[in-house]
Image: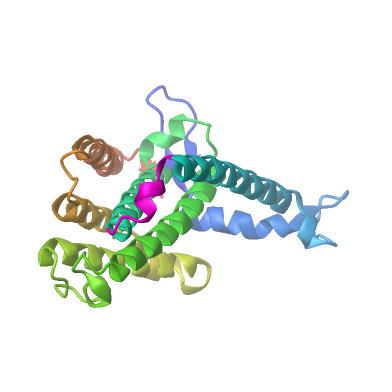
Amino acid sequence: MTMVTRPSGRAPQPVPDLDELLADRRAADLRIDGSGAVAATDDPGVTPGRAREAARTIAVLAVVLGASVVLGSLLGVHGRTLVHNKMLPWILGRSLGVASYLALAALVVLGLWLRHPWRARFRRPAASSILWAHVTLAAATVTLLAGHLTALAADTYAGVGWTGVFVPWGAQYRPTPTALGTLALYALLLVAGTAALAGSIGRRIWFPIHTVSVLVFCLTLAHGILAGSDAYSLRWVYVATGGVVLVLQATRWIGGRAGHGAAAVLE
């Protein structure tokens, strides 16, 4: 548990570690009986924590389904010529790539904010809610990335192919920028895989690897700028997302160093 002291002299506010948040989620299957003792629930499938998580998942799925129906209707009306366009795989691949980049940017921002020294000043959103959104964005990033890679590999005009997707410098189209994306892919799989095993492999193993997430974002940002044919039109998207990540990472590092130097952060 990390304690951060406010300048006003008020009592230190706890900033929960990720391991503690994961433990709290596992403890959701326990209840406190009338005597104050902790006992296992008779039916762990209907605990309040799981019920809330299921409700949030259903709400997210409903929003995604509704947005898909609306976008699908619009594309069906206005995109008839696009379906027969030979550039459709490239357009899909680029669109899914931008979507996966935005999901990754939000994922990294929430991850940085989850352990940022300034977060102790705010009660909302709760750390558990941030963690839930962080995990959801991780799943969305991997899913969108899979679509991005499949569309580009299947595109005969892109010059990427399956070799270019999985082998660095194996693509004919802009080999080095494409290779940055391949390296980011493997780094992301390493980070996501170890994070998924966080409850069983220990903090000393998974957490140092998890800090590579910022490097994954930097590789992806460089890949998007250098490999994308429409990078100029998306320049403000890259500037905004890169700026937010840079500010959060810098202030988190400076705040942590200052706090330790002044003995304001205690482990």
Estimate the x, y position of residue 10 in percent, counting from the top left. Answer: 47, 26
Q: How is the image coloured?
A: rainbow
Q: In this view of the protein, can residue 135 be seen by the observer?
A: yes
Q: Is residue 266 above or below residue 173?
A: above
Region rendered in magenta: 78-86
Q: Is residue 73 positioned above or below 25 on the image?
A: above
State the residue in front, 162 or 184: 162
Task: Answer left or right for 136 relative to 169.
Answer: right
Left or right of residue 213: residue 9: right
Residue at the (19%, 52%) spot, across then down:
228
Residue 85: in magenta span? yes
Q: Nearer the viewer, residue 204 or 163?
A: 163
Residue at 13% across, 70% down:
172
Viewer-nearest residue: 117 or 98: 98
**Farthest right residue?**
34
Q: Is residue 6 above or below residue 78?
A: above
